[in-house]
Every structure is written in structure tokens, then in C-alpha cells.
Amino acid sequence: MDKIGTPEQRCEILDWYHLKENLYKVGGSNQRLRTVETHLWHGKIATAIAAFADWDGVQAQNFIAYLHRHRLRLPNYQKFQVEGITIGSGSVESTIKRLGLRLKLSGTQWKRENI
């Protein structure tokens, strides 16, 4: 990551889909999960964590630890979406997958001018 620039020059964002995926692993009331999802969407991390304050379950504790670990990568997703900033890694993951498949093709040759 250092080659991309300093932390001040870049903005790392935790993929929204992955964040939601981890949230729903917690389980419990759908209403609580949707409420927490809304807090996360608006960048209210402390409020999202507080929603699990009365839970002793391992999944909830793991999710809280996950939020703490990635807290600097959790923006106000709604604001980013309004501004047209990508909040998911799907397009990058898809490109990597296509490149990987292309590299594994039998007899594939690369021309310098096409790279």
C-alpha cells in the first residue's frame, strides 16, 4: 500500500458488501440487523457498536472486534455513494478474476504493445 501513496493521500474503504456480510453473520433480530446496517451506512460506527452492547454472543463480539479493526476504513457510505465514489470492490475482483483466467490459458502469448 505504501507504493500507492501515504495514508493522507489515499482513502481506504471497507467493501460495503463484505461489511454487510459480516453483520448478518451475527444473527438475531432482523429489525436490529437492519437498524445497525442503517447506522453503518451513515458512518455511525459507535452507534452500531452500541446496538450490540447487551449481547454476549461470540458472533456479536467478533463483529464488534471487526468494526474496531477496520474503523479507519468505514466511511459514511451514503455520502460516498452520492458523490459517486465506489463503495464496493466487485469491479476490481472481477478484473483480477478475468486476468487470472487469461494468464492460465494454454498457448497464450502477450505482445508488449498490447500490455
Image: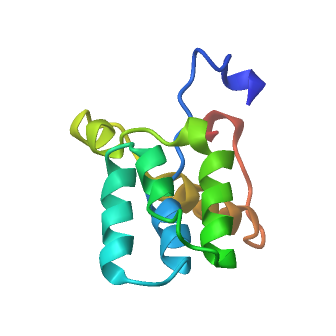
Closest to the observer, 80 or 40: 40
Q: Position of residue 39 (x, y in %)?
A: 34, 53
x 63%, y 34%: residue: 113
Quadrant location of the N terminus in the rendered image: top right
Closest to the observer, 101 or 60: 60
On the picture, is 15 further left or further right than 37? right
Q: Position of residue 66 (x, y in %)?
A: 65, 57
Q: Relative to residue 84, is residue 29 depicted above or below? A: below
Q: Position of residue 31 (x, y in %)?
A: 30, 77
On the picture, is 11 further left or further right than 87? right
The residue lying furthest to the front in this view is 54
Quadrant location of the C terminus in the rendered image: top right
On the picture, is 2 further left or further right than 64? right
Q: Relative to residue 55, is residue 71 depicted above or below? A: above
The residue lying furthest to the left in this view is 82
x 68%, y 16%: residue: 6
x 55%, y 79%: residue: 25
Quarter occupied by residue 105: bottom right
